[in-house]
Amino acid sequence: MKFNPFKYLIDNYIDKHFRLDIGKIKISKADGYSHNVRVCEICCKLIQEDNTNFICQPRFKKGIRPDIVFNRGNIIYVIEVRNTETDKRSMAKMKKLAKELKNCVIYIDANTPIEEEIIKIK
């Protein structure tokens, strides 16, 4: 059986008691305008790519909610949109992330133009 990294992520890290919407954009009133716009831009780029699964604001078993998770090949990436919450809060959130995922975090600034290369990870 072929290894499916997205299924592995869901089975091992995602809290299944919360709704899991794969491939759907989720934004929140609690986040600022620039944060929500950046999340939408990133998700739109991921939607345009073939074979890209993503989840917006998944609830992990440890209680954290990263902005977006997606896979490229056998690697799961976590995207955190920054400069819309305090650095202290953002770093505290990422400290709770499983150690296997800590090296796969991509920080994207909410207030600067998005670089397409960041999303085009192969």
Image (cartoon, rainbow, N blue to C red):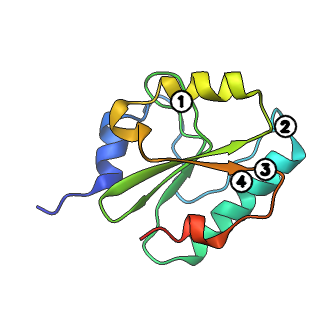
| Three-letter residue code for mark 3 | Ala
The residue carrying mark 3 is 110
Mark in front: 1 vs 2: 1
Q: CA distance from mark 1 to mark 2?
A: 22 Å
- Asked which secondary structure carries label 2, the reply is loop
Residues under numbered marks 1 and 3 in contact, where contact means CB atoms less than 8 Å apart: no
- Sequence-wise, the earlier of marks 1 and 3 is 1
Mark in front: 3 vs 4: 3
- Sequence-wise, the earlier of marks 1 and 2 is 2
Q: Quadrant of the N terminus?
A: bottom left
- Asked which secondary structure carries label 1, the reply is helix
- Sequence-wise, the earlier of marks 1 and 4 is 4
Residues under numbered marks 1 and 2 in contact, where contact means CB atoms less than 8 Å apart: no
Q: CA distance from mark 1 to mark 3?
A: 17 Å
Q: CA distance from mark 2 to mark 3?
A: 16 Å
Residue found at the very far left of the displayed protein: 1
Q: CA distance from mark 1 to mark 4?
A: 17 Å
Q: CA distance from mark 3 to mark 4?
A: 9 Å
Residue 25 position in % (x across, y down): 67, 55
The residue carrying mark 4 is 39
Residue drawn at (33%, 37%), measured in percent from left and top? 100
Q: Please give left or right for residue 91 compared with residue 81 in the image.
A: left
Vertical position of residue 39 compared to residue 20: above or below = below
The residue carrying mark 2 is 29
Residue 53 position in % (x across, y down): 46, 62
| Three-letter residue code for mark 1 | Met
Q: Please give left or right for residue 120 compared with residue 87 in the image.
A: left
Residue 22 position in % (x across, y down): 51, 54
Near mark 4 (Cα within 10 A), the count class, few <14, some 14-19 or many ≥20, is: many
